[in-house]
Image: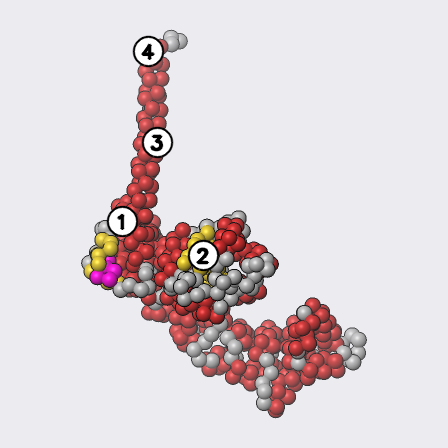
Amino acid sequence: MDAPTPQRKPKVVVADDDPDIRRLVQITVTNAGCDVTVAADGEEAVELVRTSRPDLVILDVLMPRMDGWEVAKELKGDPETAPIPIMFLTSRGQEHDVLEGFNSGAADYMVKPFSPRELQVRVRAILAKR
Amino acid sequence: MSFDLNTLELALTCLAMALAGLVLFIMVMRMIREHRAAVAARVRETVVEALGQILDTQRTFAVDERTAFVDDIPVYVMPPPGGIVGDAVRETIVDHLSFISGDLRVRLVSMLERGGYVADATRSLHSPVAETRLKSCMMLGGMHSRIAVPALIEIFNDDPDPMVRINAGEALGVIGAEPAVAHLLKALRTPTRFQQVRVSEVLSRMGMTAVPALTAAIDDDDVRIIALALDILADIGWMSDFDPAIRALTHVSPEVRARAAEALGRCGALNAVEPLMNAASDPAWFVRVRVMKALQVLGSPHDRSQRARFLGTLEQGLHDGVWWVRQHAAEALVRVGDDGRRLLARAMLEAPESPARRAAVSALQQFMISSAARPKATAAAR
């Protein structure tokens, strides 16, 4: 996987089944200087990640066909996609959910309702580490 | 008996006409519903398009009367509230408010306020129809506007319908305005258990906003209020000041003492370890149980003399007459570390029928099972 060069915008895949949230996150992360593609469910997200090899994946948890936990396990279980950082953006905010998220290999975990500004800062922080 | 065919024919004709009228009515209602849904969908698309610019963090935002400006360019004019269009606009913005926090949420709330939507819903709080008032409470909660708080407080205190009052309370909880907390607390005095539970849930959801008022409520005269305040603070997991709860450890009511012990443990009140140790000899067994649980959570002090007293307190609990107290004391001793486990090992040397021995064996067994289940790397690091 190529590290982002000054000429190439970081690629981010956003997966959420809610079209309003998907759109808002897409705009927010695009404004953070990224190229964003979206998926409406878990299976689509896995397919998109495998074909586009993004620099970051932002996942909702409660999605049809494959939930966020399963997507994370699938990606982390594949040597080709395992190094891609994952951030969860979800309404599930109980302690055990957060622990589950990090145990699935997440680099970050944000709970909805979320601040778009905070999301941008966190995305930049994750991308800066790569 | 003669059979009048004309009457029968007339009756059948009337029936047919009535059925035709009913079918026509159903078709017309369906067409109206579909038209409304189509209009609402188009309006929603337009609003979402505008929100894409309004919620852009890189751009400035202002709202003047009904017009929203982004980088000084008008991007959306809010229609008047009400009707298909107004309702669709409000619902779209409220949907976005449900998943956005921070300063961008303020942009959306100001659009609803300047567009007259909050004022319109507030006026409906005075409708003679309870259902309308209830829906207005829910709408105002969804709009997250603090302008609505005084009107909601009034409805919460004075509405004749209990479900309207409950929904007003929930709306206040969603908005999270601190002025509402005192009124919500006052409502905890209500004898209706259902309302008490709902208000307690609202206060728990308000979280840190409600903490100062709840902490102050621990000094209330009403035992029910003190107990509920302690329960809610335990749920929230924080207090603005631990002293009222520490004082409550010596309250005349054992229920209050028990809740104080639990709340101090769950709120992580490390400076409460000493008072909790003092409370370990409480005459009420359920207070002693909560004290042991709290000490288990808070852990041993670092100071050597305090630590010795801490261990002595737990050892005393291990020999308590009540099984539950012994169990929690034993679990706390396991968590203390080697010193605690030595005390448990000593208890195992007691007579086989000794209750303390059984509690020690059970706790050590659990500890060994969970240690074996942990990954070897973690065990090595320990």
Asked whether the residues under the numbered discs 2 and 3 touch, taking CB atoms below 8 Å apart as contact, a structural biologist would say no
Of B234 and B368, which appears nearest the observer? B368
Say whether residue B191 is visible: no
Q: Which mark is residue B39?
A: none
Residue extending furthest left?
B65
Q: Secondary structure at mark 1?
A: helix
Question: What chain does badge 4 belong to?
Answer: B
Q: Are marks 1 and 4 on the same chain?
A: yes
Q: Secondary structure at mark 2?
A: strand
Circle 3 — which element? helix
Q: Percent from the top left, x then y, of residue B134?
A: 34, 53
- The chain to which mark 2 is attached is A
Q: Is residue B100 placed above or below B346 in the rendered structure? A: above
Compare residues B252 and B131 and report the one nearer the observer: B131
Crowding around mark 1 (Cα neighbors within 10 Å: few <14, some 14 to 19, many 20+) is some
In the picture, measured across the screen, residue B167 lies left or right of residue B242, that is: left
